[in-house]
């Protein structure tokens, strides 16, 4: 069976006159777009424009709900209850679903952003709240979760199709979590080092952690961060490497995931 993977990117993270990322150049290189919903970044006009651009390129639409923290870009932990997490995700996914419908599209998936994502990896009550919010809005949506994590298992338990997510530009800890951005080794900035990590995850089902240990991962969807410098170069280089290795790049869907939604 031929190997395949989805290539996703966080985008639509501009706000008012402030511009973040290079969405127009990245969009032709990816298969899934995780679009900010206004809490950590984005605004209604940016949401609409990003959805329209993604549809024009045949890219699958995803909601990217985050914490209500514009000044911190949603990357600072907040003390929230599971109920608050649920309410935040319902509102944001609902808004993105409506924006997609207004442009003749439909949401395909949901991926939590930044601190909300990482908090849900560690706190399974939060993970369940986020997953239940997605399910209650639309149980056909694919839930993007950190590969081989308890977060992914919880989402499956509530009845969602899950795409196990790996990262092209982030280093890993021995427990399979991402290295915190506060550490100097958190981001992978060398495209060749990123390619080695990507091929290892897709072809071998494991990743080398910062301490040299091997961590098992399932790779359904691969993330490139659109706000990092050189995102376009990363996307082009990785896409070419995947093609050269005979790995098909295509979007995830509930049907392709093998999980009944």
Image (spheres, rainbow, N blue to C red):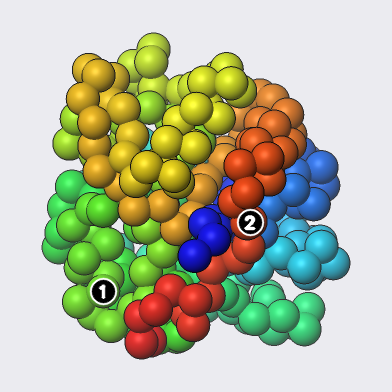
Circle number at residue 156: 1
- Pointer 2 residue: 249
Residue count near mark 2 (Cα–Cα under 10 Å), binned few <14, some 14–19, many ≥20 = some
Q: Earlier in the sequence, mark 2 or mark 1?
A: 1
Question: Residue 160, image x and y in percent?
Answer: 34, 78
Q: Quadrant of residue 183?
A: top left
Q: 258 and 91: which one is in front?
A: 258
Q: Is residue 195 above or below residue 190?
A: below
Q: 12 and 155: which one is in front?
A: 155
Q: Quadrant of residue 18?
A: top right
Q: Is residue 105 above or below residue 80?
A: below
Residue 181 makes an appearance in the image: yes
Q: Quadrant of the C terminus?
A: bottom left
Q: Is residue 24 above or below residue 33?
A: above
Mark-to-mark CA distance, 2 and 1: 24 Å
Q: Secondary structure at mark 1?
A: helix
Q: 259 and 241: which one is in front?
A: 241
- Which residue is found at the position 69% from the left and 32% from the top? 237
């Amino acid at each position: 069976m031929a190997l395949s993977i989805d290539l996703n990117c966080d985008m639509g993270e501009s706000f008012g006159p402030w511009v973040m990322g290079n969405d127009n150049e990245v969009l032709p290189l990816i298969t899934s777009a995780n679009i900010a919903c206004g809490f950590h970044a984005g605004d209604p006009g940016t949401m609409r424009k990003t959805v329209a651009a993604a549809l024009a390129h045949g890219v699958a639409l995803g909601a990217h709900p985050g914490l209500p923290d514009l000044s911190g870009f949603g990357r600072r932990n907040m003390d929230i209850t599971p109920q608050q997490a649920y309410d935040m995700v319902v509102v944001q996914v609902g808004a993105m679903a409506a924006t997609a419908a207004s442009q003749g599209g439909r949401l395909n998936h949901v991926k939590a952003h930044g601190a909300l994502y990482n908090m849900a990896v560690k706190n399974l009550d939060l993970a369940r709240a986020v997953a239940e919010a997605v399910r209650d809005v639309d149980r056909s949506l694919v839930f993007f979760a950190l590969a081989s994590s308890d977060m992914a298992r919880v989402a499956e338990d509530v009845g969602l199709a899950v795409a196990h997510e790996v990262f092209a530009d982030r280093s890993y800890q021995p427990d399979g979590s991402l290295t915190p951005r506060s550490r100097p080794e958190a981001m992978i900035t060398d495209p060749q080092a990123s390619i080695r990590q990507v091929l290892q995850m897709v072809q071998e089902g494991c990743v080398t952690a910062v301490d040299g240990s091997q961590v098992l991962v399932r790779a359904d969807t691969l993330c490139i961060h659109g706000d990092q410098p050189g995102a376009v170069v990363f996307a082009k280089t990785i896409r070419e490497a995947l093609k050269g290795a005979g790995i098909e790049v295509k979007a995830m869907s509930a049907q392709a995931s093998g999980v009944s939604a």
